[in-house]
Amino acid sequence: MLTSGWKAVSMVDVHGKITFTLWLCGCNLRCPFCHNWRIAEGKGCFELERGAMLEELEVNSFLVDYFHVTGGEPLIQWAELSSLLACVKALDVPVSLNTNLTLVGPLEKLLNAGLVDHIATDLKAPPAALYGLPEKASERLWRLFLRGLELVSNYGLPLELRIPVPKGFDVWPWIEEGLGHLDTEFYVVINPLVGKPLTNPRDEAWCSAHCWPEDEVRNLGERLDELGIEFHINRWA
């Protein structure tokens, strides 16, 4: 299992929770704003020392609300992840999975095995711009994402729905569609997309044009407020 490392105690990876966070390598998307793109592309990754990580998790387990797996896209390595999460559950530590929800088959295997207690995902809109892939591929992945939301709802898992907000796009039609596929406990975290000097995005030119939104964040907050949806805004600057 390829990783870029872990952090024993984190207060920033799940809203309002303390996590033990593990980063796994690889991803099936090419998001232009991604600041973890090196992990996604496997740069600087190494084999996970499972024993050492589990030992550190056990020592810190009384401090954390979740063992949180992120990336990259963790479900790229779903078979190895399934084995690891079984070990985590044996320590009686709840599991949070940060996934883009497009790898629906592997996700269902983990959920069916009872290995996940919480989901975090990004609703990336518009998909053709934020997935960083050709339009037809992005459309297919968006449909898989919606199926992923339905799957999470079917299992009744609590969800942190993160919305990365770009500048210069009308994202509401996709957000509205995504919300219509949810039937589980959730809240929204609005993440205004930011670039340098706070992050090192995959595509600096794209980020120069579409990062640092202001009006878009305000408008989205107003719409969510009108619907009575709980939301939080990450303020990076």
Image (cartoon, rainbow, N blue to C red):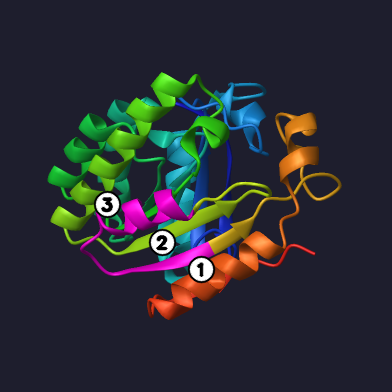
Q: Specify which label sits upstream in the sequence, 3 or 2.
A: 3
Residue 83 can be seen in this image: no
> How busy is the neighbourhood of tag 1: few (under 14 within 10 Å), some, or many (20 plus)?
some
Splitting the image into 4 quarters, where does residue 76 fall? Answer: top left
> What residue type is disc 2 on?
Glu
Magenta residues?
172-189
The image's mark for residue 116 is 3
Query: Which sits in the foreground, 227 or 230?
Result: 227
Residue 123: say if magenta: no
The picture places residue 55, in percent across and down from the top left corner, at 45, 49
The image's mark for residue 15 is 1
User: Which residue is painted at 47% across and 55% down in the image?
Assistant: 172
Tag 2 and tag 1, C-beta contact below 8 Å? yes
Query: Which sits in the foreground, 46 or 181?
Result: 181
User: Which residue is painted at 36% across and 35% down in the image?
Assistant: 142
Q: Tag 1, which secondary structure? A: loop
Q: Specify which label sits upstream in the sequence, 1 or 3.
A: 1
The picture places residue 177, in percent across and down from the top left corner, at 33, 52
Splitting the image into 4 quarters, where does residue 77 fall? Answer: top left
